[in-house]
Image (spheres, grey):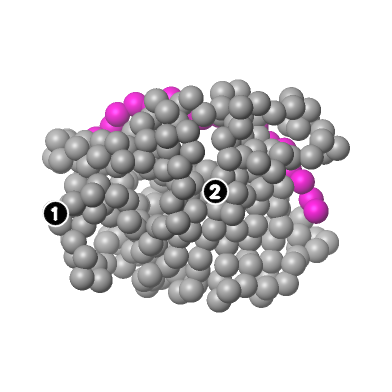
Amino acid sequence: MKKIISVCLWAVLVVSVSAQDNGRAAELAQRVETKLGSSEAMENVRFLRFDFDVFVDGNPVYTARHLWDRWTGRYREEGQAYRDGELLEGEDKAEALDQARYNYLNDTYWLLMPWKLHDPGVNLSAFSQETEDGHSYDVLHLTFGAAVGDTPGDQHWIFVNPETGALERTGYFLERFEKNPPVLGEATLWNWSNWTELNGLLFARTREVVRTTHDPFETARSEFSLIAILPDVDDAVFTSFDVPMPNK
């Protein structure tokens, strides 16, 4: 297995809320944080260890193992890539795994999205209540400034149960869909489930596609098969492949 060690930095949190919906959007963002755990609790997490797997039609298409020292930016990633359910080898494998930086950005955002609502350059607005599959939701809409990340044209929606404050599904419209303007009705929707609590923080281990218009993978499912908050790790795990990554 090709292993990748990379260093990335965690952004300082600031508030950037769309003026037209400032009050309602801020209220919804706070409700999400209150339900899933405070940003202060997340800031106290130093060593975050997680495994991320993606399946399409029940077949694995991607798997990655992550270890992140969020206080120093040290990062280690190990991964495997598949095509048509077959494990890639040789040059195909090397090309796929060279996307380590993208994997870091994508996988950590997918895990930690509820705690990144106030990142620099994030604009929040609130939708009136939306109904999906017979269920009503309060909806928080995320857009990004032009200099944010590699794909600032992406947009996200968070669906909040109005009675419990629970985050039950999310939607995204990616800039690569090349549609203008992005609309919620054409967003890819994912249900979030299989919640687990660690250090006062709630994480959804399972995400499943429930609707897609532009994505080719109508049966996609992602799993965080491991999520662990570690009190300490051996420093050498970030510098030597001979030191195994902790598994819990």
Q: Residue at x 56, y 45 (%)?
A: 227
Residue at position x 76%, y 32% in the image: 237
Q: Which residue was labeled with disc 2? A: 107
User: Could you classify mark 2 by the number of other residues whose Cα lies within 10 Å: few (under 14), some (14-19), or many (20 or more)?
Assistant: many
Residue 62 position, x and y percent, is 63, 61
In the image, which residues are magenta?
A: 1-18
Is residue 153 visible in the rendered image? The answer is yes
Mark 1 highlights which residue?
Answer: 128
Q: Is residue 8 visible?
A: no
- Residue 173 sits in quarter: bottom left
In the figure, 66 relative to 177: above or below?
above
The one nearer the camera, 13 or 59, is: 59
Left or right: 247 with respect to 169? Answer: right
Question: Residue drawn 57% across and 35% down?
Answer: 229
Residue type beneath disc 1: Ser
- Residue at the right extreme? 242
What secondary structure is marked by label 1? strand
Residue 80: image location, x then y, percent: 71, 57
Is residue 66 depicted above or below 194 in this figure? above
Q: Residues within 10 Å of mark 1 (few under 14, many from 20)?
A: few
Name the magenta segment's main secondary structure.
loop
Element at label 2? helix
Q: Name the spot of residue 35 as percent of width and height, x first.
A: 31, 41
Q: CA distance from mark 1 to mark 2?
A: 30 Å
Residue 183 in the image, given as x and y percentages of width and height: 27, 62
Residue name at image x 13 percent, y 54 percent: 128
Residue 5 is a magenta residue: yes
* Residue type, numbered disc 2: Asp
Disc nearer the start of the sequence (1/2): 2
For the residues bearing labels 1 and 2, Cβ distance under 8 angstroms: no
Q: Is residue 13 located in the magenta-colored stretch of the structure?
A: yes
